Image (cartoon, grey):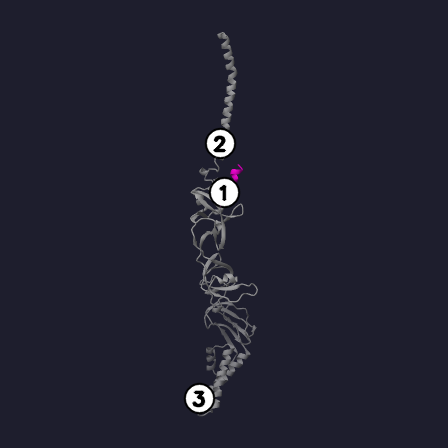
Amino acid sequence: MNKPYYTVLLSLFLVLAKPLSAADNHGHEDEHKHEMTSQVHSDEPASAGTYRDEHDHAHEEEGGLRLSARQRRQAGIRIETLLPKPIENQIEAPGEIRLNNYTTRQVTPRIEAQVIERHVRMGDRVTVGQPLVSLSSVAMSKAQATLLTAQYEWQRVRKLGRKVVSERRYQEARIAAQQARASLLAYGMTAEQIDRLAKGSQVELASGRFELLAAIDGTVVHDNFVVGQMVAPGDRMFVVSDESQLWVEARLDPLSAYRIREGSLARILVNDQWLACRVTQIHHELDETTRTLSVRLTIPNPDDRLHSGQFVTVRIEADDSDEMGLLLPNDAVLHSPDGDWQVFVEHEPDLFKPMEVEIVRQLGDRVLVEGIEAGTRVVTDGAFFVQSELAKSSFDVHNH
């Protein structure tokens, strides 16, 4: 083959090969651009999970959730090392605040009478001996007149002496005076009131008017009557109570009541606040309707914040409180997607993973758990946030 012919063939080959190489190079450039674009727009690296720490976002990693220190602070996440603690076996029951019957007095008339004048009202503080109400009674008038007559006769006979009057008359006069005083005491007059009446000599003193007095220092908590009303013996006109200490009546099933004793520490929840008290009495008879046993607690009430009739929640420490166990706040234990109970543990720094546990017992605001080793670092505050972020990250990874 001569040289000119070879030169022509080589030139023709180069002309045909040049477009093919350009197209091929263009294809490689497009593929490279596609890879770059995919890396720019993709939120997923080659490994499982998503790193978005520059924007402070959570990401799923190895079946758990990685959170930055800033995220943990913002979410209020608190981590504690789980260690065995004494189990405060608490028995929870509904309760009701009631007046302390030992520091409460009912004020009632002992004879039929009419209300003449009211001296105090509900809510007033009263002291021992303070007049509460004035009443008038025909029976009281007759008894007062009898006292004045008997007292006058007894004073006259005593002055004459036994040398002048017979022994029989002397004793009759003395006994009559004593009986008259006893009748007035039985009708509701005090000894001081009777003495003041006996010292007088006017018949008009026997007017039938008398007063009911406060028997204790306390507060008037009941006064359901009106002036002019006729009242019968035993009608409750006033209730005066010293409310510095009140009772809480809690009803427990017999088995729970057996686990407590008089003097056991307790708390009551009222107005979103826990107040300390103690068990003072345990009834010995079951309620016929509820078949529960009433337990009485005494609670101080120095600032008069508590009142009879309020419903409360009672927690009493049981007498068998020597057990040890792993305790967690209620909010730290959540339902897993499968319906089991789970907690979130710090698998390694900043990495949190769910772990199934078993709730053994509910203890007020804490739970006794099993299925987890002592020394495990567990999320005690903010577990719901961790669970929500893990669920959201898992959804993003599988549905991107």
Q: Few, some or many C-alpha atoms within 10 Å of disc 1 (few <14, some 14-19, many ≥20)?
A: many
Which of the marked residues, 1 or 3, is nearer the chain's N terminus?
3
Q: Residue at x 52, y 40 (%)?
A: 395
Q: How far across and down, in percent of the image, does residue 336 sit?
A: 52, 46
Q: Residue at x 54, y 79 (%)?
A: 139
Q: What amino acid does circle 2 point to?
A: Gln
* Residue beneath disc 3: 159
Which residue occupies the foreground of this view, 53 or 364? 364
In the rendered image of this protein, does residue 77 appear above or below residue 320?
above
Q: What amino acid does circle 3 point to?
A: Lys
Which span of residues is magenta-colored?
385-400
Q: Is residue 157 visible?
A: yes
Q: Main secondary structure of the magenta part?
A: helix
- The dot on residue 39 is 2
* Residue beneath disc 1: 390
Which of the marked residues, 2 or 3, is nearer the chain's N terminus?
2
Q: What amino acid does circle 1 point to?
A: Leu
Q: CA distance from mark 2 to mark 3?
A: 127 Å
Q: Is residue 137 magenta?
A: no
Q: CA distance from mark 1 to mark 3?
A: 105 Å
